Amino acid sequence: MRGFASFETVYLGFPIWGETTPPVIRSFLKAHDWSGKTLQPFITHGGYGPGNSMAILRSHAPGARIEEPFVLEADQERRTLNQVKEWLGK
C-alpha cells in the first residue's frame, strides 16, 4: 500500500470468519510497519462476536496503538430499524 508510512491512524474494517480475523487481514497487518500508528478496527460478525480478532491484531501489528473496536452484528442494523419502526407505529 503506497503512502502507508505517512498515515498516523489506520481504520481497518473486516468481517469475522470462523470466529477469527480473515487471512487477507493478517497478511495486510504483517506487511506493514505499525510502529507509532493508531489502529482503529471496525468489525462485523454473524452472531458470535469478534472472536480472537483483537489478539490477532495485537500479535500481527506490533508497535500499534490499537483502539477499542466498533463491533456490529451482521443484521443488527436491520433489526434495530425494524424495532424503531414498530415502536413508532404504535
Image (tube, rainbow, N blue to C red):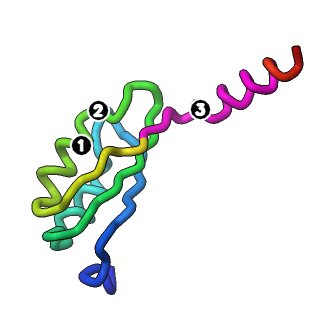
Q: Amino acid at mark 1?
A: Met
Which of 14/69 is in front?
69
- Position of 53 with respect to 59 (left or right) is right
Residue 82 occupies quadrant: top right
Q: CA distance from mark 2 to mark 1?
A: 8 Å
Identify the secondary structure beneath mark 2: loop
Nearest to viewer (mark 3 / mark 1): 1
**2 versus 61 height, above or below:** below
Q: Which residues are magenta?
A: 71-86
Badge 1: how crowded within 10 Å, few (<14), some, or many (20+)?
A: some
Q: Position of residue 17 (x, y in %)?
A: 36, 39
Q: Amino acid at mark 3?
A: Asp
- Asked if labels 1 and 2 touch by Cβ distance under 8 angstroms, the answer is no
Residue bearing mark 1: 54
Residue bearing mark 2: 51
Identify the secondary structure beneath mark 1: helix
Q: Residue at x 24, y 82 (%)?
A: 5
Residue 20 occupies quadrant: top left
Q: CA distance from mark 2 to mark 3?
A: 17 Å
Give whichever of discs 2 and 3 has the lower sequence position: 2
